[in-house]
């Protein structure tokens, strides 16, 4: 069955609902297993040191293959890659739920990450080619941002409920019917689109291999640095190899007639600035979810279900703020909203530094969660809009792959840095004779302070790097409704 005409509001809303559902599943899978890790470790006899790779294997492959996934969508069809990615994601989720060993589960999670890397940039580029630039796209990306931003918090909530009531396997099984539904509905709800110059469409294989391997190795070096040590030869060698491959990619792209990433796209000041800000947003976001989860369970003593429910206010705050953010971008432009959002995130994370070893959810977690959630909702949407504004239709997949990659690599880097900060501060407290609860709280507090600095730096760089003129013109065009519909 072919896709319906997407000129009616109802058809567009159904398409957006399908795409947002996909992004929600992709995002929650980075966090849904967090509260299930103790159960997974017991069931599959995985050591504490290796348990983090149940999360990292997904993040590693997802971050490494996003750029390639975005470009494949432009070359071979956005709907086709979207469906292929979701089919692979669903199959890997099913295999992971049936895992009988550590290796089986980690490989399944890695394949999940590959499916997500194919589906996510394709989905975002379909949003930008379906909705006209201006107020219509701002509203669509407001909904997209609400879903994507809340995914991290909702993942912990859903993971807690499923682990407590159904078993750890269901944090993976839950993806299967959703992926099947999305693949079934995609031909009915989405139009196919691809780069127009079909006769010249070729894939830059050397560029694809070098950037994918480079990003994957670099992300691997970052997520493993907290355990291996930042200055260890292992970390330095892996980092050098990753950076060397990325440098080789730059050389290849400059010499290739049809590059995977045409560097001309970076001539746009706002796109460059949005991706830098995206890195810092990821650095503060991922680490916040991780540290809050540990504080709730290791210090306050909450079980998986209680820890999951503790994320509900945060998820609601992100959803409501992201919905408002799309409207604010139309009124005042994306730059002021990005800056306000990151300043609010910074304030929320700074508030988190006041956590107490004998505290409670109501006193120590609720207030800063709401503030940080509002800030993230206000940040996610305008950063995405800024990263996609002004790009050509044939570059939609590339631009969406870039902003997704920025946030994922930023998340890996932030988590590695903050885990190292927390471990160091905790060790110092233990050395001073502190109790376990006090030492852990000192570590989390130190990590939140660094996270607050990341968000503050993001606000400062947004003020400098994102064009005020572009932001103003975007808002004025959206208010006048002058932006043209993208070509079918």
Image: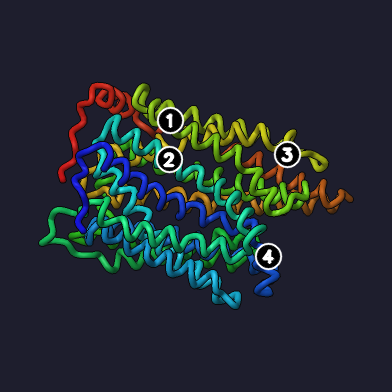
Q: Residues within 10 Å of mark 4 (few under 14, many from 20)?
A: some
Mark 4–mark 2 CB contact (< 8 Å): no
Counting residues from the N terminus, which is met first, the one under dot 4 or under dot 3? 4
Q: Quadrant of the N terminus?
A: bottom left
Asked which secondary structure carries label 4, the reply is helix
Q: Residue 115 or 267: which is nearer the viewer? A: 115
Lateral position of residue 192 relative to residue 140, left or right: left
Counting residues from the N terminus, which is met first, the one under dot 3 or under dot 1? 1
Asked which secondary structure carries label 1, the reply is helix
Mark 1–mark 2 CB contact (< 8 Å): yes
Judging by the rendered image, the residue that carries numbered circle 2 is 145
Residue drawn where x is 26% and y is 36% of the image: 9
Q: CA distance from mark 3 to mark 1?
A: 28 Å
Q: How many circles with numbers are drawn on the protein?
A: 4
Asked which secondary structure carries label 3, the reply is helix
Mark 3–mark 1 CB contact (< 8 Å): no
Q: CA distance from mark 4 to mark 2?
A: 31 Å
Q: CA distance from mark 1 to mark 2?
A: 9 Å
Q: CA distance from mark 1 to mark 4?
A: 38 Å
Q: CA distance from mark 2 to mark 3?
A: 27 Å
Colour mapping used in the image: rainbow
Residue drawn where x is 54% and y is 46% of the image: 283
Query: Based on the displayed image, in which of its 4 quarters is residue 62 positioned?
Result: bottom left
Residue drawn where x is 56% and y is 74% of the image: 99
Counting residues from the N terminus, which is met first, the one under dot 1 or under dot 4? 4
Judging by the rendered image, the residue that carries numbered circle 1 is 325
Foreground mark, 1 or 4, reads: 4
Judging by the rendered image, the residue that carries numbered circle 3 is 361
Judging by the rendered image, the residue that carries numbered circle 4 is 39
């Amino acid at each position: 069955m072919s896709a319906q005409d997407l000129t009616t509001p109802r058809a567009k809303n159904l398409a957006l609902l399908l795409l947002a559902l996909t992004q929600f599943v992709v995002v929650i899978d980075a966090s849904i297993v967090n509260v299930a890790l103790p159960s997974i470790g017991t069931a599959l006899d995985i050591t504490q040191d290796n348990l983090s790779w149940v999360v990292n294997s997904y993040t590693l492959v997802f971050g490494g293959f996003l750029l390639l996934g975005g470009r494949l969508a432009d070359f071979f069809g956005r709907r086709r890659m979207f469906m292929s990615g979701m089919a692979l994601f669903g199959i890997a989720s099913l295999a992971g739920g049936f895992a009988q060993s550590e290796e089986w589960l980690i490989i399944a999670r890695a394949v999940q990450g590959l499916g997500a890397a194919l589906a996510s940039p394709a989905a975002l580029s379909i949003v930008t080619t379906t909705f006209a630039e201006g107020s219509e796209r701002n509203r669509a990306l407001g909904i997209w941002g609400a879903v994507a931003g809340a995914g991290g918090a909702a993942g912990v909530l859903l993971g807690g409920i499923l682990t407590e009531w159904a078993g750890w396997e269901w944090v993976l099984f839950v993806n299967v019917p959703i992926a099947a539904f999305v693949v079934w509905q995609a031909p009915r709800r989405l139009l196919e689109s691809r780069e127009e110059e079909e006769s010249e469409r070729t894939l830059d294989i050397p560029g694809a291999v070098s950037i994918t391997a480079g990003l994957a190795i670099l992300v691997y070096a970052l997520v493993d640095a907290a355990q291996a040590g930042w200055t260890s030869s292992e970390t330095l060698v892996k980092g050098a190899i990753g950076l060397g491959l990325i440098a080789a990619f730059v050389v290849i792209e400059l010499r290739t007639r049809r590059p995977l990433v045409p560097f001309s796209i970076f001539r746009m000041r706002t796109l460059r600035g949005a991706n830098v800000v995206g890195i810092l947003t990821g650095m503060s976001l991922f680490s916040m979810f991780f540290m809050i989860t540990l504080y709730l369970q290791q210090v306050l003593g909450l079980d998986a279900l209680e820890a999951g429910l503790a994320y509900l206010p945060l998820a609601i705050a992100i959803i409501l703020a992201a919905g408002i953010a799309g409207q604010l971008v139309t009124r005042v432009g994306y730059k002021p909203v990005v800056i306000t959002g990151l300043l609010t995130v910074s304030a929320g994370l700074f508030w988190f530094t006041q956590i107490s070893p004998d505290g409670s959810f109501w006193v120590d977690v609720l207030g800063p969660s709401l503030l940080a959630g509002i800030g993230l909702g206000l940040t996610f949407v305008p950063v995405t809009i800024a990263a996609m504004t002004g790009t050509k239709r044939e570059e939609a997949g590339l631009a969406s792959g870039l902003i997704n990659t920025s946030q994922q690599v930023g998340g890996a880097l932030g988590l590695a840095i903050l885990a190292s900060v927390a471990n160091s501060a905790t060790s110092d407290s233990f050395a001073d004779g502190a109790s376990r609860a006090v030492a852990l709280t000192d570590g989390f507090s130190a990590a939140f302070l660094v996270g607050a600095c990341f968000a503050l730096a993001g606000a400062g760089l947004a003020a400098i790097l994102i064009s005020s003129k572009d932001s103003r013109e975007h808002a004025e065009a959206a208010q006048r409704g002058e932006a043209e519909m993208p070509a079918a």
